[in-house]
Amino acid sequence: MSNDLTGAVLIEDMTDRERELAQRVESVLPALRERAERADAKGEFPMQNIAALREAGLLGLIVPEAYGGLGGGLRDLTAAAFALGTACPSTALAYFFHCSSASRGLLPLEALEAGLFSADEAPVVKAFAEKLLARMGRDGLWLANFASEQVKTTASAITISTEAKPVEGGWRLTGTKSFGCSTGVADEYLVTARLAGTTTAEGLCVFFVKRDAPGVRERSKWDSVGMRATATHGIILEDVFVPEEEALALPGAFVKMMQMSRGSFVGNQVAVAAIYLGVAYNVYQYALNFVTGLKFEDTGKSIAADSPFHQELIGKMTVELETATLWLRRQLELETAEPPILPKPRVVAQWRLCKGVVCDAAFNLATLALKACGTSNTGDHGVIARGLRDLSMGLVQAFPAERGRLEAAKMIVTGAEQASFSSRK
Amino acid sequence: MSNDLTGAVLIEDMTDRERELAQRVESVLPALRERAERADAKGEFPMQNIAALREAGLLGLIVPEAYGGLGGGLRDLTAAAFALGTACPSTALAYFFHCSSASRGLLPLEALEAGLFSADEAPVVKAFAEKLLARMGRDGLWLANFASEQVKTTASAITISTEAKPVEGGWRLTGTKSFGCSTGVADEYLVTARLAGTTTAEGLCVFFVKRDAPGVRERSKWDSVGMRATATHGIILEDVFVPEEEALALPGAFVKMMQMSRGSFVGNQVAVAAIYLGVAYNVYQYALNFVTGLKFEDTGKSIAADSPFHQELIGKMTVELETATLWLRRQLELETAEPPILPKPRVVAQWRLCKGVVCDAAFNLATLALKACGTSNTGDHGVIARGLRDLSMGLVQAFPAERGRLEAAKMIVTGAEQASFSSRK
Amino acid sequence: MSNDLTGAVLIEDMTDRERELAQRVESVLPALRERAERADAKGEFPMQNIAALREAGLLGLIVPEAYGGLGGGLRDLTAAAFALGTACPSTALAYFFHCSSASRGLLPLEALEAGLFSADEAPVVKAFAEKLLARMGRDGLWLANFASEQVKTTASAITISTEAKPVEGGWRLTGTKSFGCSTGVADEYLVTARLAGTTTAEGLCVFFVKRDAPGVRERSKWDSVGMRATATHGIILEDVFVPEEEALALPGAFVKMMQMSRGSFVGNQVAVAAIYLGVAYNVYQYALNFVTGLKFEDTGKSIAADSPFHQELIGKMTVELETATLWLRRQLELETAEPPILPKPRVVAQWRLCKGVVCDAAFNLATLALKACGTSNTGDHGVIARGLRDLSMGLVQAFPAERGRLEAAKMIVTGAEQASFSSRK
Amino acid sequence: MSNDLTGAVLIEDMTDRERELAQRVESVLPALRERAERADAKGEFPMQNIAALREAGLLGLIVPEAYGGLGGGLRDLTAAAFALGTACPSTALAYFFHCSSASRGLLPLEALEAGLFSADEAPVVKAFAEKLLARMGRDGLWLANFASEQVKTTASAITISTEAKPVEGGWRLTGTKSFGCSTGVADEYLVTARLAGTTTAEGLCVFFVKRDAPGVRERSKWDSVGMRATATHGIILEDVFVPEEEALALPGAFVKMMQMSRGSFVGNQVAVAAIYLGVAYNVYQYALNFVTGLKFEDTGKSIAADSPFHQELIGKMTVELETATLWLRRQLELETAEPPILPKPRVVAQWRLCKGVVCDAAFNLATLALKACGTSNTGDHGVIARGLRDLSMGLVQAFPAERGRLEAAKMIVTGAEQASFSSRK
């Protein structure tokens, strides 16, 4: 089997259909790679990439064909994230969050099928879900997904303070979303907010917000150390009106949605880790080429072939790359295998570990690569330094490895991961 | 799918036939586990285990059915090694070396089929190979395999100084084999020696030596820190006569044999690593049970549920276990998949890394388990301390991780791993 | 300055007096080293060592000269512990606990001087303290110190369930002390118990118990993985009578005593860590000698000089040894410098870190040494394997590194370590 | 003793004179800190800092008072480097290289005193040395030091290809110096070149080159990931004329100079490591303040006080900081103690280890700090991300830890470090 497809480095056993989708991804890589360095230097979203992805039909990668999408699944999304990560990590991340928005359509449809909604609720849920999917698939819109916020309370790991008040014909939203890719770039924003007066996850709802709607503005530009071209500035919403039909404002709908996910939270997270793995893979290939190209001036012989410290570093880099790859493949397998290999709580615990292992290993690899490639590769915008900066973001995104391990361990010692499949059936 | 078979923890996708063989392994585990502690304490081979394994038909596990064996392959051997490792690591190791002897029959048969031997050589090779396999399968003999030696030269990683001189009707062997399980225990010894007058691998040949043949004696008892019940004392051969028909003394035969192996050296090594993983799995299960059983005296509440340092340790242990498991499964996949996923040189390089990752992770897990279980688990013959001791042997057996990484890196930087499939065809 | 004194490897700036005391320690090392292997193999306390230490006057090493001791301080005890650790770690540990008993005399005397006791209490405290010191110094008795217990409660890290009931002319003690060196070996036991009816540290008191007093018996023999010759079996006390004058049964006395300590708990703990460092130092020297002595059979050249993986291991071992040494010296400096460098709470936090760094580094060093020295050094009673086993005890004794770090961090984030010197003045 | 002086955090036992010098350093810190962020953002040398350091008299910090300097030593330089590192790491680095130039004056004077030069050579050496020192001290010039180059040969770790040809009245220099702080900024450049026709270190000589001399130009701007404001662009010399009196072009002088150094190469290197430690110290303080300031929105309680993963990270950060500090203090002690504690070869080997330990620990600390401080501290120019970037440079500057360990180990196994004091006397 040839390795002509970057995504096939990660997913070795692609079906023909998966290879077709991966081929679309492959086709955009050169252009994305071309624009990556400048986008990073400027800290600006490379707008042409959206057009390139749209043209390749990839905005609907995981949207069912019925809604104009390509009908891909988590394996396709993960392979795409990995491949894009090797070319332009920022674009990969923004693309992931766009795709991940589809879960707000897919999971409700699954919940519907599972009979989790009443006869009254069903049509509302169905209408919203189909609208969302059609926008991504048929209409080729680029979405931003504003879910998490910065504030923490003792009560909950996820605190949403953005509030939606019912008004005539719809809702008015007020709040601040600290982070979120594609700020000022996406065609529409998908905003998670809490219904006024509620305090639990039951009150969480999803709203479409137009990028230029009155009351919407960007927070100050987020000039970050890595993943600089994602336009992750966040938004401030002040009394923003959202018409009724642009919302899924049904108490409990969010929670039911989450029950359908096979992994953590709303699922798909494994694809984010694949982006960081893609970055690491690119750094590894670059470093290996660079180091094996080093020659002694006088003899022309390879330095690396006779340099134990280069070999020590390369040996460790290879272990880091392989370890991250194996964990990621395993997580993907756990979240896609039919029948399931492990019960959901165990899959969730595994994800808490996996995210940290992958991101730590990827960052360690970049650190080792820096050491192996030396001072002449410390240029801020070269592959090595850029990789190190982009991968530093992976250490903190969502949660660091140390936190993931403690949470997984807590699940394990309290037997939480032993729980049956009850959440799915 | 139920997890009733220990080996299925490692190999999740067993075929029905594989499950049948794994069931035979499972049946001997209780007896082996029962005898393990005392065998370790005494540092003596638990002789009854040979009978137990023989009765279960397992002495011919990877011997073709045509020779009275069970016809299993590397997956079966690896699953067995893992399962036995959870019960009695010493027996697992001696059993592995017994099974591994089959390669001296299987690889020659493969080389024959590949046409590597001349018409003159073919019958000699065939006769020896079939004799060996029949002894393991049909006759149920327990073999010891004396290959490697301690002396090192600049010329070669493997130096064999034991010499075979041609005499009337056979050969006379002289030399010292420093290590080798089942000394004084095996029914017969399989001894690798160098034909007198040769200096390269071309001169390596294989001889059957009777345990009690004149001139054979044991080196002094090897009272080791771990894997204490393997009877790895080594032998001294002084002018030991071996009849012609008990030898495969054909120059070049050993090298041709090795060409047929898909992994490193004569193959099968992945199953040794599975033993250490089995030990680690057992330590993990014990530690988790112990820690979750700790209660505060006054409230009866679980200590671990509210003890971050226990959780930190368990989180790390879980990562170590999973990392080792994933690397081992991957190596097994690389050595068994059809068609091959990677070319042989890359599989060999991966093994150099894999062995170290698995054994280091297993040992680290035991160290973390010791910390988590505390002073009341420092008894020399408890699961934790015994595991730590047994796993310390894994750090040095064959080669330590640091050496494996350097060697793999050297292959990688010199492009050795890029070589084509030439060695197989 | 010559390095003739083992203790001077650790403490480079010894005064003349310190060198005199270190010379006494040096004089017993050969005999202790001689007996160490057999004592470890048998798991039996080498009784002759007590006589050797007594003859050298070392039983009163840190007892003031006024009470027949040598008047040494923490620097002397630490140097002695390190030196003894290189020869016989078990004896070093039992000796440490003997010496550490002196704190039950020294700290009360300091507290007296600081005016912490009332006029009524003072004579009682003084009498007990002087009796204890004279027994160690003038009488040359070997003491065992039974303080900590195994049971844990939510209320406290240290829970003492052994209870002392007042009876005519003294007390009756009942309880189990799980661990404690010199069980059945020491001339007398120093036992910490809780006055009946009390629940806080205020109720903790100290009692002399005769080894063979009615009601005293040993728990079952503790056959541990390392530090095997310390006779750490623990005792069971059933209604054991202790005459009034053999106790310091003054409510609050224990707490006042602890206030005088400059380090953690009753102080001196840094000397325990020095024992493990001594073991590691011995392992390092052995491994270095062994590895540099390895030669290629054919050329006679040094293997290590041309073996990157040996060099990688030695480089790491050297870093571990130096790191452990530097932390230990620093802790000792913090606990002995006048005027104090840091306030006591910061010294305590540093100790929580130091203990873990030293013991982890020492154990890592032994693991690396095992890898560097290879299979021929896996004999259970050789320096390498014995070192690994002895050092595994250091990982769990008192607390593992992971726990120490969490506790230190908690002190740091809650500002506990910022507290003033109030506890000392 | 108060901790009012930043340098005193590292060097606790400063003399009064050392405190005076440290006070001068302290006085410039606020201004440097103020300008640091912008200088990093722009990647431009903050020119005002030179004036600030000159005004404080610090350009002659380690120049003897006889030449208009402050007469400080390595302890003063190290304390200054640490303190400046907490404020503006780039300036600290450029300042270090300026100060380090003094070794080209100090070491020759020491070699003179040691009688290493002939009667003919002595006046030439003396004149050059005094000129250099006076320029730094009396004249307050800021120097750049161009020594190392990028090209590697099998013959030597240090290869100098820049060549000096004798011409009438002086020399003509041609070559490329890839790295060197203060390019285009320093008043004069100190350039190490090889006399035409020589191939060994005997031929190395030192030349003063005017910044704007004909034939001198800058290489392209080096836009690095960290230490961005050092103007480390490197220079290209094409037939640059240097008058005889501006050179120390005496064969063998360089080697004699190096013999006088107590540490590695030309000494002083320990102060570079102190800069990275200073950066790490600043990151630590910032992170600790940030984390302890995190509060739960609903209760106002400290998050860190009840967050094990924050505590785990802080515990590890504290260990990294302390470990780096202890190694650095030790190296400084080894290079300054009288009489010497260890022979020079052992001090050199220790430095190979120390550099790696300090820089790895500093970088690890920043990585942990990033994890502890989370996404809101990933701004490219905040303390955390800037620290991570600056510290990444420390990983590769001079040599990475992996290389240093291998070199130290090689010295140790070949007994090179056992060599006597011969190099000094």
Image (cartoon, coloured by chain):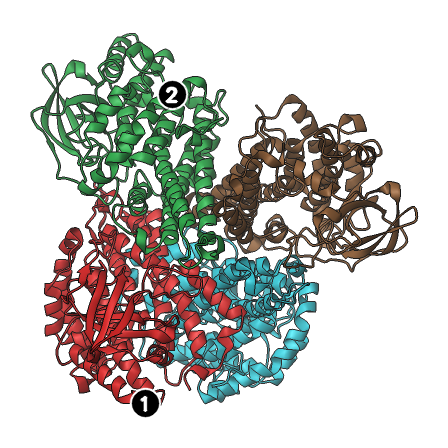
Chain colours: A red, B cyan, C brown, D green
Which quarter of the picture shows residue D153? top left
Question: B16 or C91, which lies in front?
Answer: C91
**Which chain letter goes with mark 2?**
D
Percent coordinates x, y for residue A405 in the rendering: 45, 63
* Residue kind at label 1, given as amino acid type: Glu
**Residue at which label 2 appears:** D73
Residue C211's disc is: none
Q: Secondary structure at mark 2?
A: loop
Q: Secondary structure at mark 1?
A: helix
Residue A385 located left or right of residue B265: left
Q: Residue furthest left?
A: D214
Percent coordinates x, y for residue C252 in the rendering: 74, 43
Tag nearer the camera, 2 or 1: 1
**Residue at which label 1 appears:** A113
- Seen at 35% across and 31% down, the residue is D83
Question: B47 or C224, which lies in front?
Answer: C224
Residue B405 located left or right of residue A172: right
- Seen at 43% across and 41% down, the residue is D321
Q: Quadrant of the C terminus of chain D?
A: top left
Which quarter of the picture shows residue C246? top right
**Which chain letter goes with mark 1?**
A
Percent coordinates x, y for residue A34 in the rendering: 12, 59
Q: Residues within 10 Å of mark 1 (few under 14, many from 20)?
A: few
Vertically, is A271 above or below C314?
A: below
- Seen at 50% across and 44% down, the residue is C415
Question: D141 or A109, which lies in front?
Answer: A109
* Residue kind at label 2, given as amino acid type: Gly
Residue B171 located left or right of residue D66: right
